[in-house]
Image (tube, grey):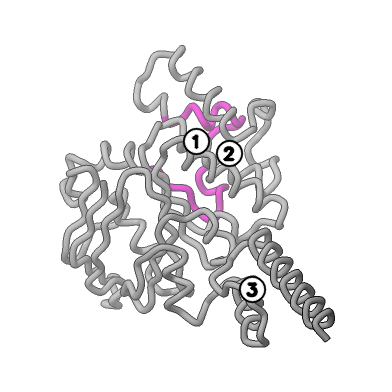
Amino acid sequence: MIQIKDLNYRYPDGTLALDGVDLSIEKGEFVALIGKNGCGKTTLVRHLNALLAPTSGFVSVFGMDTTDTSNVWNIRQTVGMVFQNPQTQFVGTTLEEDVAFGPENLALPQNEIRERVDRSLREVDLLEYRTHAPKALSGGQMQRAAIAGVLAMEPQCIVLDEVTSMLDPGSRRKVLDTIAQLHHSGKTIIYVTQRIEEILPLADKIVSMNNGKIEFIGTPQEYLASVKSPIPAITDLMRKLKAKGFDVKDDVFTVDDALLEITQAIQARDKSKTETSGNG
């Protein structure tokens, strides 16, 4: 679906932001793009819908060269972008007007626009807020509203750039649940984050960047097996327990799996103590 070959990008001041990036993303994948601030994550994803053009190298989206200006409109319909601050994407006075903006620019019939608006708002659980002003919504609702605006364009791939970074835990969970549902419906998801703990349970592929380069590509399990940091707090806890002699897996990254591992380890220890006591 997306092919990136030897991608290099320099800012106007000469700073090298991307250095020889190679990456393939398949249709239907959930890709988590991780790394510290300034490592090149946002610069990379801005190449995926032609917001930026390579200094050198090649980016192809469904066979469309992103440097060919005749492809830009089709590329931006194929790859939708949701940014960290959703307020920068709002253009309508009401939520339904905002979500309708993209389809209206496609000159679609009114009945199809209405259908897309309703379906998109329903997918993000905001249909009852259709007449509300987007900027009057809560932070989490605004992010889901921004996602609805992208969904109305019916992209095959959605890029989400640090969309939970300014949200409280409850709002973050709702946004992540929405994104997981979109992935299950067949959308390709590219999720940019520094919160490794929130994305490991959802991602098919982890792509880790540092200083403009990709330093790791693999599954969540492969990532945890190959790196010491950054790792989720749960994984860190399991590694410490294992180091103290508990028979637990150290590649666990969800609370539920950690609880199961710890429970089984405690039960095994209690059983061993009982058997030893009985034999004595």
Q: Secondary structure at mark 3?
A: helix
Q: Which residue position is annotated with label 2?
A: 145
Residues at marks 2 and 1 touching, judged by CB atoms closer than 8 Å: yes
* Residue beneath the point at 70% across and 67% down: 264
Position of residue 113 relative to residue 99, above or below, is: above
State how far apart marks 2 and 1 are (Cα): 6 Å
Closer to the eye: label 3 or 2: 3
Q: Secondary structure at mark 1?
A: helix
Disc 1 residue type?
Gly
Asked whether the beta carbons under mark 3 and mark 2 sit within 8 Å of each other, the answer is no
Which portion, as a residue range, is magenta? 80-102
Residue 67 percent across, percent down from the top left: 18, 52
Amino acid type, mark 3: Ala
Q: Is residue 1 left or right of residue 227?
A: left
Residue beneath the point at 23% across and 59% down: 4
Residue identifier under label 3: 233
* Residue 245 drawn in magenta: no
